[in-house]
Image: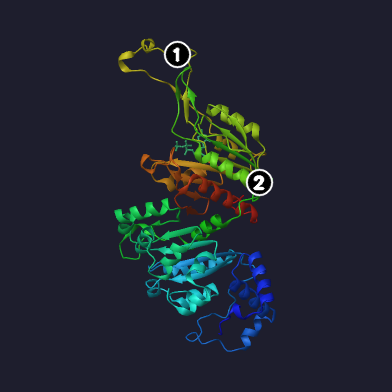
Amino acid sequence: MASLTVRQLDEKLKTLLRLRAARNRRSMEDEVRVILRQAAEATGLEALDLIEPPNPAATPQPARPAVAPTETRRVVLIIGGGIAAYKSLDLIRRLRERRCAVRCILTAAAQEFVTPLAAGALAGEHAFTDLFDPRSELDVGHIRLARDCDLVIVAPATADLMAKMAGGHADDLATAVLLATDKPVLLAPAMNPQMWRHKATRRNLAQLLQDGVRTVGPNAGEMAERGEAGTGRMAEPMEIAAAVEALLAPAASALAGKRVLITSGPTHEPIDPVRYIANRSSGKQGHAIARAAADAGAVVTLVSGPVTVPDPPGVTVTHVESARDMLAAVEAALPADIAIFAAAVADWRAAQTSGQKLKKEAGDTPKEGFRLALTENPDILSTIAHLKDTRPSLVIGFAAETERVVEHAKAKLKRKGCDWILANDVSPESGVMGGDLNRVHLVTADRVEDWPTQSKDEVAQMLIARIAAALALPIRKDAR
Ligand code: CTP
């Protein structure tokens, strides 16, 4: 197909085109493509059946249009060289189903697993492979590839590609685009578990996270190598697509007018006037969710235990101390459309609280030590999830676990009667309790999504985007 040179157009036409491209936030070349596509489509797609299919060797462009008019978001998908590359072909379809125009870049190693032709045919635009391909450089160019998009995805992100990214290499098209982009980058790592565990990969991952890169997966499971299992499988295309959706979702007004009730922070259970039972929750995650819900247009009530983080702006905050106070405040805040229970509620309180400070010598069996009798607190999440008339239509809990995170979360989902659980590893090594990063798994009745390690603000935004997406869908079992 002949290439098009915008330079040859007359000045007036060029100005009009420039204005139209700027208005649509596209490059001029992209705008020309859209105009041509719309004009061609107006002749009827069935006309394609009347002509001979193009010779794929001579013409790598597929017959289908590059960007359907309904595809409003643009992503660059970099396919790295790993066996999981075959899943990236399905990812292209999943992304296009979600109104994303996809431009593919294949590394040299990726082409050992999948062909540019297959990727291009699914994407509806020829796949890019070569940094020094004069046709690609004149047509789009690696800088424009890096910038004319809303998100860059790397799937599979191999250990080698991650190492190159962490080191700032730019010796092929994929790494040059990754270095030149000013857009968010999402990695879907995939490699052998030993490579994933290797100190070098851990170092590179830590560097990339610090650089603001997001990750989805890898998941645990069987490896392509016979008899090998562990963490290293690339996240499933649907999980990657959900992560993309969350990163691209327009947050503003997504929850306009919805009433959202959130609990956050620890509870303090008094023993006497100066002592209490508590936990290490900082309230950062619950407060971030309240902030993100308010930013998305929701009417938010936050019931917060004792925390040092400030009240989020634009949110009605009720401050409480104990689990029983928290339950009362939550019940008083109903009705709500959505309830999110992020508080780390103390499961137990002192069976009796003393009006005066307990004295050491007052213990009647000092040699055996002091014994504190405990009694169970009400389960706020379970109470609200089991309400008949005033149950919010979406009830979301958290599961703070230190082992077998997803397994425990699945059991909690059933036991507590909520719709979703955000499970996170709060073991001391994870640094989640009190820290700024979080890695959660969204557990619903029929699936588990592994979310990338990201800041608590990003987790909050991703959750709000998932809620907005669920509310926009027809009522489903997992999104009531
Ligand atoms: N929760 C609650 N009221 C309680 C205990 C927990 O509302 N008395 C909520 C938390 O806010 C969270 C979910 O239940 O959304 C799970 O909390 P978690 O501490 O992980 O679980 P527990 O119910 O305490 O169970 P376990 O201690 O056995 O893990």
Q: In this view of the protein, which residue sits in the foreground, 309 or 460?
A: 309
Q: In this view of the protein, which residue sits in the foreground, 17 or 273?
A: 17
The residue sitting at 40% across, 12% down in the picture is 359
Return the x and y of residue 465 as percentages of the image width and height: 58, 52
Disc 2: residue Cβ within 8 A of ligand 1's nearest atom: no
Which residue does the numbered mark 2 point to in the structure image? 297
Q: Quadrant of residue 46?
A: bottom right
Q: Quadrant of residue 74?
A: bottom right
Please determine whether, in this image, residue 71 is positioned above or below residue 302: below
Q: Residue furthest front?
A: 11
The residue sitting at 53% across, 57% down in the picture is 242
- Amino acid at dot 2: Gly
Q: Which mark is residue 234?
A: none
Sequence order check: which comes first, mark 2 or mark 1? 2
Please determine whether, in this image, residue 156 is positioned above or below residue 33: above
Q: Is residue 67 visible?
A: no
Helix, strand or loop under label 2:
loop
Question: Which of label 2 and label 1 is nearer to you?
Answer: 2
Please determine whether, in this image, residue 461 is positioned above or below residue 69: above
In the rendered structure, are the residues bearing label 2 and label 1 in contact, judged by CB atoms less than 8 Å apart? no
Please determine whether, in this image, residue 66 is positioned above or below residue 76: below
Neighbour tally class for label 1: few under 14, some 14-19, many 20 plus, Cα within 10 Å: few
Which residue does the numbered mark 1 point to in the structure image? 357
Return the x and y of residue 231 as percentages of the image width and height: 36, 56
Neighbour tally class for label 2: few under 14, some 14-19, many 20 plus, Cα within 10 Å: some
- Amino acid at dot 1: Lys
Q: Quadrant of the N terminus?
A: bottom right
Return the x and y of residue 162 as percentages of the image width and height: 38, 60
Q: Is 310 left or right of 157, judged from the image as shown?
A: right
Return the x and y of residue 156 as percentages of the image width and height: 42, 64
Helix, strand or loop under label 1:
loop
- Disc 2 to disc 1, how far (Cα)? 46 Å
